Image: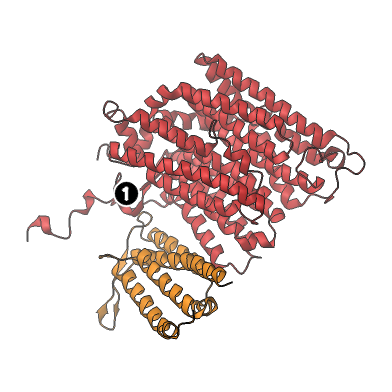
């Protein structure tokens, strides 16, 4: 029998043959862990009393795994594991670099905070609807999106988190929630479809879906492949996901309808997944085209900031206002992506991480305020400061953080972004950033004045509950402490982010991790 | 449904289709078939049974809640990927064992476990939808 017809072909040409180190399993473990726990919760659908505890323990485990993963990446650079031993680019690679690990860790911290807060917010009917399984599957999707090294796989994780988020947003099936869910669902489906079409287009041009392979081939294909079209389509698709102007309208229309903890998780996680994908694709895969498009992205960023800030100023509902502040923050991140360079990209990553923590905490604060004051409306909330000075102080710190005032976490990324914008001579972008900071200060000052400082008139500000549930206070306090700690001692995070941004712009370590022997 | 013929035939038809779905599931490794299509066949069997004899009968017959079946399938699929930790190979690598049962070599693999997981997810999720739609339709 001729050698070529033998069923036992030379496997070393197709498979990774060296044994996988145990530490490399950290790359896939966040996803597998969340999926397993989510599946377990679905199986235990009758034991709804157990759900919260299993989920909180599971999320705590996820934080631990992500900490270990970040340590591993810090120690040994980007880590790759290819599913089923197939060699990249044919096997689906999970490649984690510093950016992915930082985002995944922050997301898991936010999710753990949400899991604890949900003890106070999700009642038996919410549990029966399946809040906790949806939460775990959402985290599987979010972690997968941050950790994958394959662009089609990224699309799959987007779908996973989108489906789970549909489940979360209609939790309770109230009329308003269905209305919000339709707006949310429709635009997100359009964005996901656009992402899928663009990915198909990309595959037709490159013949590969592996991110490292794309990054390697992009320069060589600059003359022949329609890279500008691809980049523009990706920017539009991810911009929709991230709620950038002019495709931002779905966010304020839907984020105030679900349970507080669901809004908080969405504000912290979902738009940031869009931002992460935008950074990954435009900065690492198609850097030259990002350069070309930078003016468009900068303009969209500046308008997103201003629309968000002005929109927030016009709102009389606590949660609607926060929805606009999320949009405004996305604008600042886009500005960083547009400016580029270590300062711009570093600022964008830093701002995204800060925004994940602080926006989630602000939604928690709105939930606590509504529990104490009986309403989300700024015109009927009143006198919270007089009754709960400690809680008011926590909210004020968050207000400072979101406005970018020192000594909180919002200050440093804003400094980086303004400096980076001025360095390349985009004074108008720097002015927009500073003006947005000023407007946000006015917004937060306004709500603090109305809901907290103003004394309740007779018959106004009905008290629903006189005390704050510890399950709501704990995650809020921890997130505020994190924001304060990052603001006071930014050095370790800042240096990590700077090397993350540098390795995005110069991804040779990432490529080496996927293709250890150079060209395949 | 009122037809006596349909009601008399439905249990046989259902058992035949479920049997066929398992055949398609196991055949799927090397030939057309697999967990997804097998699961769909099983769901159509359950749907026929439900149309003939009522949704309550189906729910009693499958014993577990459809969503619990889907959860078990997802769990099985995840575990199928995680087994490769023990063999020190990357996630989702196909691993085979060949135990001999009554003198017959039976190839078992993590790939098959994964496919069974897919089968259960499809059976659980789609029958959950189908059964609740039939329930609403009967009101």
Residue at point 30%, 28% (across, down): A219
Q: Residue at x 56, y 19 (%)?
A: A429
Residue A139 rendering spot, x and y as whole percentages: 53, 50
Left or right: where B36 falls relative to A412: left
Q: Is residue A516 visible?
A: no
Residue B54 higher or lower than A483, as above or below? below
Q: In the picture, which quadrant includes the C terminus of chain A?
A: top left
Q: Looking at the colours in the rendered structure, which chain would you say is drawn in red? A: A
What residue sits right under mark 1 in the picture?
A: A91
Q: Which color scheme did the rendering employ for the protein?
A: by chain
Q: Residue A154 appears at what percent x and percent y?
A: 42, 44
The N terminus of chain A - image quarter: bottom left
Left or right for B132, reference A218: right
Q: Is residue A6 left or right of residue B126?
A: left
Of helix, strand and loop, which one carries label 1?
loop
Q: Residue at x 55, y 39 (%)?
A: A271
Q: As displayed, is residue B56 above or below residue A109?
A: below
Image location (x, y in percent) of residue B103: 25, 82
Q: Nearer the viewer, residue B125 or A51?
A: B125
Whether A352 is drawn above or below A223: the answer is: below
Is residue A479 shown left or right of residue A510? Answer: right
Displayed quadrant of residue A193: top left
Colour representing chain B: orange
């Amino acid at each position: 029998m001729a050698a070529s017809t033998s069923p036992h072909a030379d496997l070393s040409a197709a498979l990774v043959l060296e044994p996988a180190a145990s530490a490399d399993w950290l790359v896939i473990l966040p996803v597998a862990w969340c999926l397993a726990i989510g599946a377990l919760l679905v199986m235990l659908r009758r034991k709804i009393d157990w759900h919260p505890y299993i989920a909180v323990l599971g999320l705590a485990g996820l934080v631990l795994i992500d900490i270990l993963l970040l340590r591993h990446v810090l120690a040994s650079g980007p880590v790759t594991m290819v599913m089923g031993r197939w060699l990249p680019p044919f096997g689906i690679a999970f490649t984690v670099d510093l950016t992915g690990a930082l985002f995944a860790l922050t997301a898991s911290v936010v999710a753990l905070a949400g899991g604890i807060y949900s003890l106070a917010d999700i009642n038996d009917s919410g549990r029966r609807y399946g809040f906790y399984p949806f939460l775990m599957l959402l985290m599987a999707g979010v972690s997968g999106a941050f950790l994958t090294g394959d662009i089609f796989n990224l699309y799959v994780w987007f779908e996973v988190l989108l489906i789970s988020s549909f489940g979360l947003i209609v939790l309770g099936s109230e009329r308003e929630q269905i209305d919000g869910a339709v707006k949310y669902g429709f635009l997100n489906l359009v964005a996901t479809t656009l992402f899928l079409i663009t990915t198909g287009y990309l595959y037709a041009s490159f013949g590969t879906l592996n991110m490292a392979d794309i990054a390697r081939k992009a320069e060589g294909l600059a003359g022949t492949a329609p890279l500008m079209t691809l980049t523009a389509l990706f920017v539009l698709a991810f911009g929709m996901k991230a709620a950038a102007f002019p495709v931002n309208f779905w966010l304020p229309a839907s984020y105030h309808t679900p349970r507080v903890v669901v809004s908080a998780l969405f504000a912290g996680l979902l738009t940031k997944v869009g931002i992460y994908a935008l950074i990954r694709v435009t900065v690492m895969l198609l850097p030259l085209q990002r350069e070309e498009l930078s003016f468009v992205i900068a303009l969209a960023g500046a308008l997103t900031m201003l629309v968000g800030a002005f929109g927030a100023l016009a709102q009389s509902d606590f949660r609607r206002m926060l929805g606009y502040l999320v949009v405004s923050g996305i604008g600042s991140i886009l500005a960083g992506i547009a400016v580029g360079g270590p300062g711009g990209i570093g600022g964008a990553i830093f701002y995204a991480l800060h925004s994940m923590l602080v926006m989630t905490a602000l939604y928690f604060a709105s939930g606590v305020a509504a529990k104490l004051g009986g309403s989300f409306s700024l015109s009927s909330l009143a006198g919270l400061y007089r009754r709960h000075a400690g809680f008011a102080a926590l909210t004020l710190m968050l207000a400072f953080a979101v406005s970018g005032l020192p000594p909180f976490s919002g200050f440093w990324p804003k400094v980086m972004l303004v400096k980076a914008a001025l360095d390349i001579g985009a004074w108008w972008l720097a002015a927009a950033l500073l003006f947005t900071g000023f407007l946000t200060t006015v917004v937060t000052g306004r709500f603090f004045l109305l809901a907290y400082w103003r004394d309740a008139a007779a018959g106004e500000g009905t008290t629903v509950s006189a005390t704050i549930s510890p399950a709501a206070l704990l995650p809020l306090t921890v997130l505020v402490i994190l924001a304060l700690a990052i603001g006071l001692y930014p050095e370790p995070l800042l240096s990590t982010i700077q090397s993350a941004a540098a390795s995005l712009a110069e991804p040779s370590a990432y490529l080496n991790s996927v293709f250890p022997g150079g060209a395949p | 449904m009122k037809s006596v013929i349909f009601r008399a035939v439905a249990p046989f038809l259902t058992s035949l289709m479920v049997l066929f779905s398992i055949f398609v599931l196991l055949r799927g490794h090397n030939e057309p078939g697999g967990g997804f299509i097998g699961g769909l066949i099983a769901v159509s069997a359950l749907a026929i049974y439900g149309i003939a004899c009522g949704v309550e009968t189906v729910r009693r017959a499958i014993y577990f809640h459809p969503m619990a079946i889907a959860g078990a399938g997802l769990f099985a699929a995840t575990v199928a990927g995680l087994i490769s930790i023990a063999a020190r190979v990357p996630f989702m690598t196909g691993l085979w064992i060949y135990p001999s049962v009554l003198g017959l070599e039976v190839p078992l693999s993590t790939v098959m476990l994964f496919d069974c997981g897919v089968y259960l997810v499809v059976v659980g999720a789609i029958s959950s939808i189908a059964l609740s739609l039939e329930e609403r339709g009967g009101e």
